[in-house]
Amino acid sequence: MSAPEHLVESAAALAPEAVSPAPSPERGVDILTFGCRLNTYESEVMRGHATGLDDLIIVNTCAVTGEAERQARQAIRRAHRERPGARIVVTGCAAQIDPDRWSALPGVTRVLGNEDKLKAESWTPTALTQGNAVSDIMAARETAGHLVTEFAGRTRAFVEVQQGCDHRCTFCIIPFGRGPSRSAPVGAVVEQVRALVASGYREVVLTGVDITSWGGDLPGTPRLGQLCRRLLALVPELERLRLSSVDPVEIDDDIWRLLESEPRFMPYLHLSLQAGSDMILKRMKRRHLVEDAARVIERARAIRPRIGIGADLIAGFPTEDDVLFEETLAFVEQASLPFLHVFPYSARPGTPAARMPAVQVIERKARAARIRALGEAAAQAYYRSLIGQELSVLMETADSGHSEEFAPVRLTKPSEIGRIERVRAVAVDAGGVVAETI
């Protein structure tokens, strides 16, 4: 998730990422966003609610890693130094889990929980003077629809279709920041997408905490693929539909059919993989094994040979010895995944993994670097495979954008931001594909 271009799009842009954005020197409402795509969406909801307020800095935190929290604290301190008169409101997963810690930071005037931040009444001038508001997220049972028609500085839009998570992976604190899994109704999603298309967006990304669990709490327990199919049928003017991270064992038959036959369904899968070792996956309490992920990758490439495939991976999970790490390394190399997002393991207090025998921090970082090197080599090989091919690119700057497969593309001549260009890949550079307009 990200704030208006505070989070730079990357090859792994559909996976969680944290940066340390800087506040604007100007008065008004400034939002600093950390973490995944769901936070991007929610920051835009808050932006709408906070319209008309003055000298306010909203910090939307992430709790995925200790580094994400550190960067958010650093940003808060910097914001207070640079704009000492501004009110600072802290929210997001880290604030939900430990509000008192964030309240104690200099300049922080209010902490809002993840449910409370999305309520319009939390953003009135009076409410901002009333102290913290952090509801019990584990009691949440609904996902409210929020109509967002503008994502500042972006050409693709994000739509929240699901919140929370019912699973308990041993490394993850996020269920305690987001609450139980709950789904947005089809009608609310359709309304949101129609509004975004009417505002000029050509591509929509469906996002959530665990989006492949969408529908489990709705009448008839529909699946995510059914939502995608109905969305494309009911909003025929939508040109590109993309998914954020998906669980390998929960890709349903409708998703496979859309990949096979629907050109508006983007040929990109980002897998919540986490490891390439069965033993580590079991200790993580993941729901898939390596063979399951391998079958998904093989099937996806059989359907769409040019498909872009990414994955989230954790390096240096507790108990991961050299042999188990080499298993992950071998799988990553064999699978040749071009869009990797790699975290060194970060212990989250209160999780089972935090009590397991730890790998030294320096070794976690070294292992993450080795996996990233394999990913970079796979990315370059993937980009080279596209040379000579025609691509459809959504322009995000005057000369760059992403293809349907989510390959980063730089044009040799400028185009128009927001335009979908037909191009031919002619070369590769360090940043991705170089292409000429057809």
Image (tube, grey):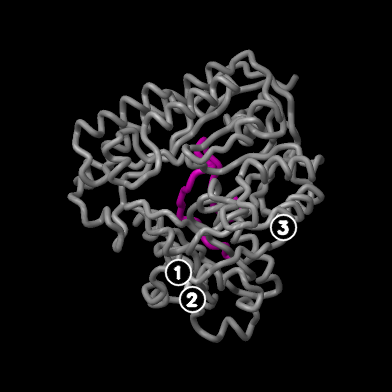
Q: Verify CB contact (< 8 Å) between mark 2 and mark 3.
A: no
Residue name at image x 59 percent, y 61 percent = 43
Q: In the picture, residue 65 is in which quadrant?
A: bottom left
Task: Return the disc, 2 or 3, that comes first in the chain's sequence.
Answer: 2
Q: CA distance from mark 2 to mark 3?
A: 25 Å
Residue name at image x 65 percent, y 57 percent = 219
Task: Return the disc, 2 or 1, that comes first in the chain's sequence.
Answer: 1
Q: Is residue 379 above or below residue 340?
A: above
Q: Amino acid at mark 3?
A: Ala
Task: Return the disc, 3 or 1, that comes first in the chain's sequence.
Answer: 1
- Residue 104, magenta (yes or no): no
Q: From which residue to which does the magenta span run?
A: 1-25
Q: CA distance from mark 2 to mark 1?
A: 7 Å
Q: Position of residue 168 (x, y in %)?
A: 38, 55
Between disc 2 and disc 3, the foreground one is 3
Q: Which residue is mark 1?
A: 96
The residue furthest top is 388
Q: Is residue 363 above or below residue 375?
A: below
Q: Amino acid at mark 1?
A: Gln
Helix, strand or loop: magenta stretch: loop
Q: Position of residue 233 (x, y in %)?
A: 78, 41
Q: Secondary structure at mark 3?
A: helix
Q: Which residue is mark 2?
A: 134
Sort mark 3 into few (<14), some (14-19) or many (20+) by Cα contacts within 10 Å. some
Q: Nearer the viewer, residue 198 or 110?
A: 198
Q: Is residue 100 above or below residue 66?
A: below
Q: Amino acid at mark 2?
A: Val
Quadrant occupied by the C terminus? top right
Q: Position of residue 124 (x, y in %)?
A: 65, 80
State left or right for residue 430 relative to residue 360: right
Q: Position of residue 157 (x, y in %)?
A: 67, 48
